Image: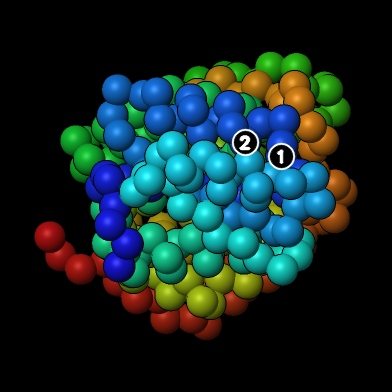
């Protein structure tokens, strides 16, 4: 086990995020509550990992780096981070983007929802109170919004923002849901995680946030990610008819 500085850790996958990585790290460490950070870098050609290594000297015991051999997908990055975080006994484990599309200050809202208000999973939601996105092309807004509607219809999830990637998990969720059996890598990964937590009996709550499109660096979004979500959801639902899900242990 590492010598950690907090009960909470923020997992941030990176690939070519040299413009953002130092700023996002400093923003998280500037919050009134202490959060540790685990950067999972997929061998970024732009030297993202080197920037993190330099910052580790400034933030020993709070900033951790996992380097992977190449681009392996968002879902596998988070699964690797979940395993590492559970092994190191973090109580609250967060997913967050590196590009400031998720406001680091909102980590506090998600932490409160889980640590003080009893949620097992807290989702930073773009759609729980209208459509709260900034600087997105209208086509992407419509696609994302109706993708969530579609997922709700197919799966029965009572969540407005089913594809959200700004999430806090209480450790027992990740210890229960058999994360090695999570199959998807892109948007569908986010859906599968929430659906599995729901099927296991965990309490999921949504916290309203404002999602701001990245200013620096290039988006990693592509049409194949949406395609995985559309068709993956049907597979997920059909598979659930024949799968026995582990259940949340009584408090």
Disc 2 to disc 1, C-alpha distance? 6 Å
Identity of the residue drawn at 27% across and 44% down: 6
x, y percentage for residue 126? 57, 28
Q: Does residue 194 appear in the picture of this structure?
A: yes
Depth check, front residue: 112 or 5: 5
Identity of the residue drawn at 38% across and 45% down: 60
Depth check, front residue: 240 or 34: 34
SS at badge 1: loop
Per the image, the residue denoted by label 1 is: 17
Identity of the residue drawn at 46% across and 43% down: 57
Q: Which mark is residue 21?
A: 2
Image-quadrant location for residue 168? top left
Location of residue 90 with respect to 7 vertically, above or below: below
Tell me if label 2 and label 1 are in contact, CB under 8 Å.
yes
Colour convention: rainbow
Label 1 packing within 10 angstroms: few (<14), some (14-19), many (20+): many
Instruction: From the viewer's perspective, tell me whether residue 246 is left or right of residue 147.
Output: left
Instruction: From the viewer's perspective, tell me whether residue 131 is left or right of residue 18.
Output: left
x, y percentage for residue 155? 56, 57
């Amino acid at each position: 086990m590492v010598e950690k500085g907090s009960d909470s850790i923020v997992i941030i996958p990176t690939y070519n995020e040299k413009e953002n990585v130092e700023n996002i790290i400093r923003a998280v460490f500037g919050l009134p509550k202490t959060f540790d950070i685990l950067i999972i870098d997929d061998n970024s050609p732009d030297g993202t990992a080197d920037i993190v290594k330099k910052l580790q000297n400034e933030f020993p015991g709070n900033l951790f780096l996992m380097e992977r051999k190449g681009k392996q997908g968002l879902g596998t990055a988070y699964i690797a981070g979940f395993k590492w975080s559970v092994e190191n006994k973090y109580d609250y484990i967060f997913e967050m983007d590196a590009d400031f599309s998720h406001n680091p200050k909102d980590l506090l809202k998600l932490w409160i929802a889980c640590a003080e208000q009893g949620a097992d999973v807290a989702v930073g939601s773009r759609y729980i109170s209208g459509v709260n996105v900034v600087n997105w092309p209208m086509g992407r807004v419509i696609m994302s919004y109706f993708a969530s509607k579609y997922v709700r219809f197919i799966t029965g999830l009572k969540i407005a923002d089913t594809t959200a990637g700004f999430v806090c998990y209480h450790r027992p969720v990740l210890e229960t849901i058999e994360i090695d059996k999570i199959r998807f890598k892109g948007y569908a990964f986010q859906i599968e995680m929430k659906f599995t937590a729901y099927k296991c009996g965990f309490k999921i709550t949504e916290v309203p946030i404002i999602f701001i499109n990245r200013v620096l660096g290039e988006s990693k979004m592509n049409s194949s990610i949406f395609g995985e979500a559309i068709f993956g959801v049907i597979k997920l639902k059909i598979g659930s008819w024949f799968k026995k899900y582990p259940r949340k242990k009584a408090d």
